[in-house]
Image (cartoon, rainbow, N blue to C red):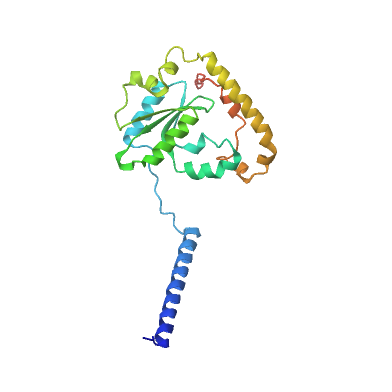
Amino acid sequence: MQMNPLLIGVMVLAALAGLLLGVVSQRRRFASQREWPQRWNLNARPLFTTDERILFKELRNALPNHVVLAKLNLLRFCQAADEFEARAWYDRLNTLHVSFAVCTPTGSVVSVIDIDSPSKASSARSQRMKEAVLEACRVRYVRCRPGQWPHQALIAAWALGQSQAGPAHHTISNSLHDAGDEVARKLRLRRAERAARWAESSFAQDSFFAFDSRLEGSLHSESEPLQASSK
């Protein structure tokens, strides 16, 4: 049965009109997102939940020689070892955050603490990714449920590990020193080889991607007491 040419024409025009309407609607939506808002309909909100505020206070009291940072993106303290993989790693990690990062006064992250929230549970893949990144960067990782962390007297050992929180906090084995020296030597060689290429990379302008010259020194950094503020 042969269809009426007029009917076919109407159907084609209707399809084209629908397609055109979709394109126009999408462009308007994108344009509205780019426009400067006429009204900043926003309100400030607290950085911490109740549990996060309590744990943050207890961490600061238990770790006076460390700096405790909150709600930190993973990309603030890790970077791609190869500049050609920087974009891929950025895409993988840019949505991952940690509840708390315990740092030395020089800014080296030594421990990460996450409070698991049932209302904001991360996917199993994201959690595995976070654990793998922290293991590769040699950062201690501990997790707890809201309100279920150790007593104040045990928090330092829980957050840093027994060896770092105890009296021998500044003692490092010779094997670790040797491993650190070897890593530093390899980093220097690789950095020298790629310096020219990296200097021209567009990623070098982004703090998430730029290689930090302080990395080499942080391999052997130890925590130092924070100086008391003058009264």
Q: Residue at x 51, y 36 (%)?
A: 76
Q: Is residue 33 above or below residue 182?
A: below
Q: Is residue 49 above or below residue 33?
A: above
Q: Residue at x 68, y 32 (%)?
A: 192
Residue 172 in picture, x, y percent from top left: 51, 15
Left or right: 55 as drawn, with respect to 132: left
Q: Is residue 116 above or below residue 151?
A: below
Residue 83 in picture, x, y percent from top left: 60, 40
Q: Tell which of 129 and 162 is nearer to you.
A: 129
Q: Tell which of 226 and 149 is nearer to you.
A: 149
Residue 163 in picture, x, y percent from top left: 43, 16
| Quadrant of the rendered image containing residue 112 | top left
| Quadrant of the rendered image containing residue 143 | top left
Residue 168 in picture, x, y percent from top left: 46, 12
Q: Residue furthest front?
A: 1
Q: Residue furthest right?
A: 196
Q: Residue at x 61, y 25 (%)?
A: 184
Left or right: 52 as drawn, with respect to 107: left
Report how many numbered discs are placed on residues in the image. 0
Quadrant (top left, top right, bottom left, bottom right) of the N terminus: bottom left
Left or right: 41 as drawn, with respect to 222: left
